[in-house]
Amino acid sequence: MYAYAQTRDWEGYFAAAAGRPPRDTLLEALARFEREGVPAPEGVPPLAVDLGCGEGRDTAELLRRGWRVVAIDGHEEAFRRLRARDDIEHWDRLEMRLSAFEECQIPACQLLNASYSLPFCEPERFMDLWKVLTLAIVPGGRFAGQLFGDRDSWAKYPDRSHQTRDEAEALLKAFEVEKFEEEERNGSDCAGKGKHWHVFHIIARKV
Ligand SMILES: C[S@@+](CC[C@H](N)C(=O)[O-])C[C@H]1O[C@@H](n2cnc3c(N)ncnc32)[C@H](O)[C@@H]1O
């Protein structure tokens, strides 16, 4: 298990996430592909990378919609839970990769889905990861996911990657931004502990 995996109660997170529906950013990106077509070779199912897949809420939906999926996560428990799901269609289209973000390989893909996962990349490795994932998305492909803002409660932790709004927008230079929704509210984390959320919900099409 990677060192990062010991810095949070990920098992508690996976238990809390069990049975939750796919993320809205993923559903909206898929709806856009359905309207406009996917930039993939004819007859080959398109490929999505689900970066920080967790227990698989988005991976399951992608497979159900006919995508191939490379699901990447650094925590073994994520894949134990993913394997135990009873709603996975087409296991043959799923590749599970146990890897830290800081050292993962990302294949060329039509969709890079990173739901609530990128803020957990080490800050000194974040720009490298962002460059690699941006390059991996084929022209006409999409990024869907979240970045966390500088006013989020967790921005104070030194091992987290948070961005100001300007920084988040600057990251999207290689994209046509289709959704950039800033959410800021007081709420709680998955363990019920009070937390100020400052999140950017993003869907962007690679130019
Ligand atoms: C908040 S969860 C999100 C899971 C899922 N995408 C969702 O939307 O529910 C973040 C996920 O990223 C993984 N993760 C966090 N930091 C990581 C790192 N540095 N390398 C690899 N995986 C990491 C965790 O194991 C966890 O599954």
Image (tube, grey):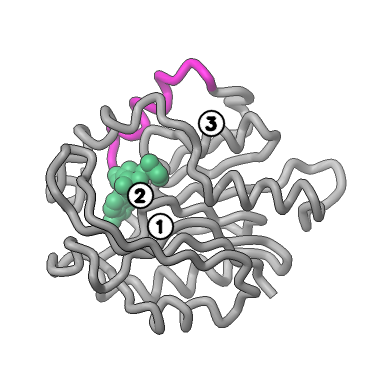
Q: Where is residue 86 in the image (x, y as percent from the top left)?
A: 48, 16
* Sequence-earlier tag: 2 or 1: 2
Between circles 3 and 1, the one closer to the viewer is 3
| Residue occupying image coordinates x 60% and y 48% | 48
Question: Is 69 included in the stretch rendered in magenta?
Answer: no
Q: Position of residue 148 (x, y in %)?
A: 33, 64
> In what element is the residue under mark 1?
loop
**Residue 182 quadrant:** bottom left
According to the picture, the residue beneath numbered tag 3 turns out to be: 60
Q: What residue type is labelled 1?
A: Cys
| Residue occupying image coordinates x 60% and y 72% | 177
Main secondary structure type of the part rendered in magenta: helix
According to the picture, the residue beneath numbered tag 2 turns out to be: 99
Asked whether mark 1 lies closer than 8 Å to ligand 1, one says yes
Q: Which amino acid does label 3 sit on?
A: Ala
Contact flag, marks 3 and 2 (Cβ < 8 Å): no
> In what element is the residue under mark 3?
helix
> Which quadrant of the figure contains the N terminus?
top left
Q: In this view, does 110 lie to the left or right of 74?
A: right
Q: Residues within 10 Å of mark 2 (few under 14, many from 20)?
A: some
Asked whether mark 2 lies closer than 8 Å to ligand 1, one says yes
Q: CA–CA distance between discs 3 and 1?
A: 21 Å
Residue 165, above or below 198 = below
Residue 71, above or below 100 = above
Residue range of the region highlighted in magenta in the rendering: 74-87
**In this rendering, does residue 64 appear at all?**
yes
According to the picture, the residue beneath numbered tag 1 turns out to be: 104
Residue 126, above or below 117 = below
> Which quadrant of the figure contains the C terminus?
bottom right
**Residue 108 quadrant:** bottom right
Contact flag, marks 2 and 1 (Cβ < 8 Å): yes
